[in-house]
Image (cartoon, rainbow, N blue to C red):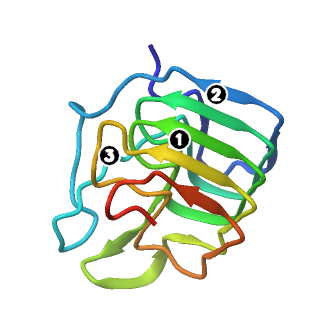
Amino acid sequence: MLETLIGIKDGAHSITIENVGFRDTAPTFFGEWSAPSGGDWALHRGGAIFIEKSKNIAIRNCIFRRLDGNAIFLSGLTRNVQIQRNVFEWIGENAIATWGDTQGYDATIQTQPMNTLVEHNIMRELGIYQKQSSAWGQSKAALSIVRNNIMFNLPPGGF
């Protein structure tokens, strides 16, 4: 079983994923985890769709169902990612997670997800395996817009 179904990396740009169903990825709760910042929130850096060092990516009208890890993960430098009109249900960890890189607490190197738009999605039954999960997990990211989404049946920390 695969953990990542689509990997978009290393300078990829201007890609649209539309009207695709994703399901049955490998569980990652025994995989590699670390803390993106100084709290107790731990995160697995991976997902069914994994985006890193890429820009102008659109994910629209897709169904993410019964994934045992994260559904979408934005890692390091990403720009102008749009996640719109998708359905996320029965997800083991986060529906959408971001994790940028910094030099300590210095973010001036700008290797963080920026200008991410998350709108008009339905996110439900999340965090089946990982109780520190959310619909939108933002760690070291900037200029994100999260609006007009429907989110319910989430873990306690769930937005």
Q: Nearer the viewer, residue 129 or 31?
A: 129
Query: How far apart are labels 2 and 1 at the CA level?
Result: 9 Å
Comes first in the chain, label 2 or label 1? 2
Disc 3, SS: loop
Residue 155 image position (x, y, % from top left): 35, 54
The disc placed on residue 71 is 1
Residue 59 image position (x, y, % from top left): 75, 48
The disc placed on residue 9 is none
Q: Quadrant of residue 156?
A: bottom left
Query: How far apart are labels 3 and 2 at the CA level?
Result: 19 Å
Residue at x-position 52% and y-position 56%? 152
Mark nearest the camera among 3 and 1 is 1
Q: Amino acid at mark 3?
A: His
Disc 2, SS: strand
At label 3, counting other C-alpha atoms closer than 10 Å, the crowd grade (few under 14, some 14-19, many 20 or more) is many
Q: Which residue is mark 3?
A: 44
Q: Are marks 2 and 1 in contact (CB under 8 Å)?
A: yes
At label 1, counting other C-alpha atoms closer than 10 Å, the crowd grade (few under 14, some 14-19, many 20 or more) is many
Quadrant location, the N terminus = top left
Report whether 147 appears left or right of 132.
Answer: right
Residue 12 image position (x, y, % from top left): 70, 48
Q: Are marks 3 and 2 in contact (CB under 8 Å)?
A: no
Report whether 131 appears left or right of 75.
Answer: left
Q: Amino acid at mark 1?
A: Ala
Comes first in the chain, label 3 or label 1? 3
Report whether 87 appears left or right of 140.
Answer: right
Q: Which residue is mark 2?
A: 22
Q: Amino acid at mark 2?
A: Phe
